[in-house]
Amino acid sequence: MLEVKNLSKTFNSPGGNVTALKDVNISIKTGEFASIIGNSGSGKSTLLSMLGALDTPTSGTIMVDDKDISKLSSKKQTVYRAKKIGFVFQQYNLIPNLSALENVMLALEFGGVSARKRKGKAEQLLNEVGIKPDEMLRKPYKLSGGQQQRVSIARALANHPSIILADEPTGNLDSETGKKIFDLLHSLSRSENTTILAVTHDMDIAGKTDRTFKLKDGKIIT
Amino acid sequence: MNVVSRGVKNAFRSPMRSGAIILMLAISIGLILSMLVARSSVNTKIDQVKSAAGTNITISPAGVFGFDGGGNNLTSTQVTQISKTAHIATTSATLSDQMAATDTNLTPSLTLGNFGARQARLDNSSSNSSGSTSTSSSSSANSEFASRPVPTPHTTVTGTTNPNSISTNGGSLSITSGKTIDGNSNSYVALVGKDLATKNNLVVGKTFTAYGGTVTVSGIYTTGNTFQDSGIIMPLATIQTLSGQSGEVSSVIATVDSSDNVNATVTSLKSTLGSKADIVSQTQQATDSVSSLQSISGLALTSVIGAAIAGSVIILLAMIMIVRERRREIGVIKAIGGTNKKVMAQFVAEALTITVVGSIVGLTLGILVSGPMTSSLVSNSQNSSSTQSSTRAAAGPGGALFRGGINRIGSNITQVTSSVTPGVFASAVAITLLIAIIGSAIPAWFIARISPAEVLRAE
């Protein structure tokens, strides 16, 4: 269960205060696949960074499994990110000099999985997202965009997070690959019972999710 | 795959760049080591020279240098004062004189040459105006009105309480035949220089005349110095009596009981003898002669500091560059749950890897170049200083008394042997570690400031 109440975020800038989010209220059930759509500058990324504990809100609460994460210390934020959150980025953001397998193992390391179990678990996760054994040992630049995004989904799933936050997960992919990635996320939300919140431009994709929130000028309008 | 192995792996992520950084670092570390080696070798040499310099103090009459200059010899009262000064263990006194043809039946073995003729020219003109009975004036008096004076060489005679003090190598006088003489006696015996003995067919037991007295040859000595080997050594009292300079000495060498007391003794001698005597200690001369080494030592230390700063700056800038370049990657690691500590540890491991590889190359380089570098540093600076001192080293017997010893030190100074001692090596390694710490501390601070929200920002 993800419950956002009266969430606001104001940035101090040289030209005065800029309000990025204003009284945002969202409620998503566990295992639901939700999407947020909105123009650039509408506050999508800011909302995502609040939910992912990358930043702290100016006011309001974010309850994840009945725990307020909006007022965590930066140390506890890190722990929360490691164990409760999985990120999927538009740019994939895999570590360039680590193999696909090592990238997933890195997330397992941060999640506190013992060194002996990491490799087997990472192989299992990559297998689940459809990465073949010989591809697991490749560096990201030797994988296609779709494969890289699969690896990053495996990385996001590594520690059985409560929420997967996806920032334009199909934004850099052709429509066919994008659809496959979307289907993968969709099936995972079902099989793993993981809440998925995806930010997207793609109305096709948004239309297929369980719920869609529309963000405009920092406010939810639907 | 843990933090450390990721850091090590990252160090070689861009082989060309890492290679360039390692090379620059290696050069500065090599410089640090070779300069530390140069410094420690030179310092060892300075200590050696200073400790070998001994505790002798030379007291000579003011204004006298060899047979040049003017002034009055030291009197017996002054000699007594010197020997009674605190901390002075032993003294040896010397009176040098020159015998002209009228004073002795010996033929001088030295030819005047250009140098001698020039000195004698001055003697002649001065004797004419002052009318003194200088030893050389009578022989040249006949030719006074000729177009050019025809000077004759003199035979140098040295009266000393310690014949070994004539030795040019600082050790015992080398006697080739016969036996040495007792410097404290007043008998008419002499040690004759090899060249003079050959010229006059003198052997042990034969006699010659000096200042009207008959002197028996006790032994033949050689020093390897042509000037000294053309002279005669007699007991001090004998010369004082024969030459009519009762109680007078032209030089005193006093040995101080401990090297710590040398400077204090020089000060107290200066106050008792005042302006009548020039006082020089061996320690002081040794200090003067190693001054160029001391400047090398200072230069080497400056280089060590400079190279250490350069090394730190190289690794610091490289790490700052790497951290800035990987901002996004650092953000990703933090976003997926990597703690600040882990990211920092990874970068410190990377900096350490570069530094370790750089220091292995650099220390090897340092060991290879430290020998040639030390000798080139020493010989370059020593060349300029030795030309200055060599003109003075040719002075007469008064100056030569222990100048021989100092010359030996002078030639030794250029023979500084460089060796990489464990201590020097350890300090080079310590400096290198310091470089790595400085090089990664500031980038670590940058890392801590990178926000994980960075990853959501569009490129």
Image (tube, rainbow, N blue to C red):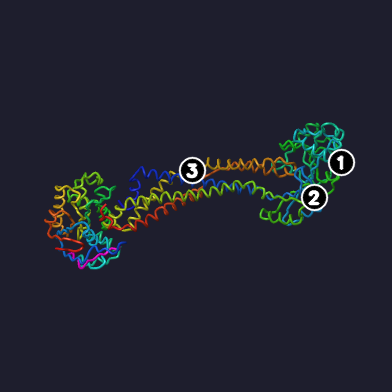
Q: What mark, if any, has residue B367 been given in the picture?
A: 3
Look at label 3 and name its amino acid: Ile
First in sequence: mark 1 vs mark 2? 2
Residue A37 as seen in the image, left or right of residue A97: left
Whether residue B219 appears in this view of the structure is no
The residue at 42%/46% (across/down) is B358
Q: Chain of mark 3?
A: B
Q: Residue at 38% across / 43% down in the picture? A: B19
**Which residues lie in the magenta part?**
A1-12
The crowd level at tag 2 (other Cα within 10 Å; few <14, some 14-19, many 20+) is: many
Disc nearest the viewer among 3 and 2? 2
**Residue under label 1:** B133
Residue nearer the viewer, B185 or B85: B85
CA gap between label 3 and label 2 equals: 55 Å
Coordinates of residue B236 in the picture (x, y in percent): 81, 45
Distance (Cα) linking label 1 and label 3: 67 Å
SS for dot 3: helix
Q: Amino acid at mark 1?
A: Thr
Instruction: Check disc 2 and report the residue beneath it.
Output: B74
Camera-side residue: B240 or B208? B240
Classify mark 3: residues with Cα within 10 Å, few (<14), some (14-19) or many (20+): some
Q: Is residue A218 above or below residue B185?
A: below
Q: Secondary structure at mark 1?
A: loop
The reply to whether discs 1 and 3 touch (Cβ–Cβ < 8 Å) is no
Labels 1 and 3 in the same subunit: yes
Q: Position of residue B141 (x, y in %)?
A: 86, 35
Please count the marks in the image: 3
Q: Chain of mark 1?
A: B
